[in-house]
Amino acid sequence: MTVKRYLPFASAVLLTTVSAVAFASEPWSMPGEEAIEPYTPSAANAGAQPFAGDQMFQAFGGQAGVARIVTDLLDRSFADARISDIFKGHDRVRLQRVLVEQFCFLLGGPCAYSGRDMATAHKDMGVQPGDMNALVENLQLAMEEEGIPFQTQNRFLAKLAPMKRDIVDK
Amino acid sequence: MRLYLVYFALTNLRHRWFMEHGSAFRGQLGADMRRMFFGVLLAVATVAPAAADEIKTGGKLLLTGGVSSIEGSGGGGLATWATTTGYATEEGVGGNVHGTYVTLPDFELRSWGAAVGVFDRVELSYARQSFDTQDAGAALGLGQGFTFNQDIWGVKVVVIGDAVYDQDRLLPQIAVGAQHKRNDRGAIIAAVGGEDDTGTDYYVAATKLLLDRSLLLNGTVRMTKANQGGLLGFGGPNGSDYSAQFEGSVAWLATKRLAIGAEYRSKPSNLGFAREDDWMDLFAAYALNKNLSVTAAWVSLGDIATFRDQSGFYISLQAGF
């Protein structure tokens, strides 16, 4: 009886503590990642509105599927002679984490994006239009590998495409 | 190496063209078009080697350059689109050659040509069409296998928009262009009532990829006097002025390599001796890779030169980068 009565309160306290811990390790200096300039985390940083519902997230195989796609995307891009120079020297641990967060969030999954906005994240990288297309090709291959149907891939790419304006020639 | 090939191909094309048609151009408009065409070619050819590390090739996504239309410009089969041909992005130069064969109940239409896309902004194209009248030629009193040939010089400039990446905007990619056409059968064209054997089409094309639906839409408004696209000359007793005609394409992206769709193209009916119909087609374009694509279509070209219901098979091969 008593336990039941205090359960909501207890969970609230627990949740607060968990988020406090999450904020304590700031998203710009996470353990195992190279620290970067502090910034204000915001859902708007993800660069697009997420899909409504979680059908897209499920179609992408949930958290595990998204993680595999991002791993494959980065494997391909770090090894891709066309764009490996851009990736070389970048913190892959952080990149993997924020990309999984971003994809999961945009696909309607239960994730928050803690990374920077696209313009800041790609500032002075010198990404050219062809580089962006090369990355898209790698993402297409990674999604194919995961068995995502082509039209479903395109729905996701349609979300990402306008980010080109904040990524290329910055 | 690739840049050298571009340079070589362009120089060769120019040389070849002068050898074949050196004195064929007549009239101020033709001279202007030619000057503009070779001016840009020359600029590309001279800038390209000088800025060798800057110019890239082949950065676009598969099929996003469209295929070569029957008139040589980048587009679908019968319609011209707002996309620039080839796989170059705004950092580079792309190009391709095409060969197209259309077999109809009473005629045969062949086209070959070359096009370059410069910085994903400008497209220059050349196509030579041959309209073979086969047995119909004899029936029409022209002679068995009498063939109309037409040279088409095209210039297209992208004005605004990004058909592929602007997925959060309704604004399509918009391009304006011109196709200067010169038919080599002036005497016959005059005899059937055609006013001219040369003409220039002007068009505005809008192309939009609806990526979340895997659909590509295109609409083009063309100002033209052309009879059967110019194969039967320009203007006639039923119309000697420019008229606005529409060409529309819808394509569904079935896979990364395969687009299937339909096109419609309205046409004027200027000639008196034969009615002219609108064109339509159902097509499938398949990209083997970024260097080779095949387009197959069923085309319905309606009545041509009194011969009814000219529907048949269209096949086009395109090679480029």
Image: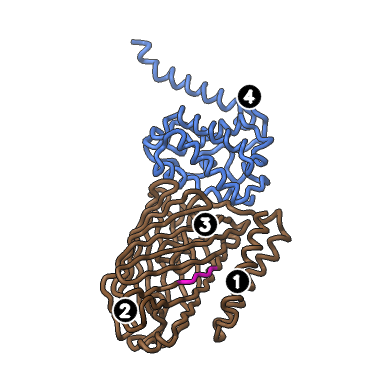
Q: CA distance from mark 3 to mark 4?
A: 51 Å
Q: Position of residue B182 (x, y in %)?
A: 49, 79
Q: In the rendered image, what is the letter of the chain coloured brown?
A: B
Examine the structure image and report whether residue B11 is included in the region drawn in magenta. no
Q: Residues within 10 Å of mark 1 (few under 14, many from 20)?
A: few
Location of mark 3 (residue):
B319
Residue in the picture at 44% in, 85% down? B186
Q: Nearer the viewer, mark 1 or mark 2?
A: 1
Residue in the picture at 54% in, 40% down? A138
Q: Kindly identify the amino acid type of the residue bearing the numbered disc 3.
A: Ala
Q: Kindly identify the amino acid type of the residue bearing the numbered disc 2.
A: Ala
In this view, A62 is above or below B113:
above
Q: In the rendered view, does B283 fall on the left or right side of B20? A: left
- Identify the disc placed on residue B305: 2
Location of mark 1 (residue):
B16
Magenta: main secondary structure equals strand
Quarter of the image that includes the N terminus of chain A: top left
Q: Position of residue B176 (x, y in %)?
A: 50, 70
Of mark 1 and mark 2, the one earlier in the sequence is 1
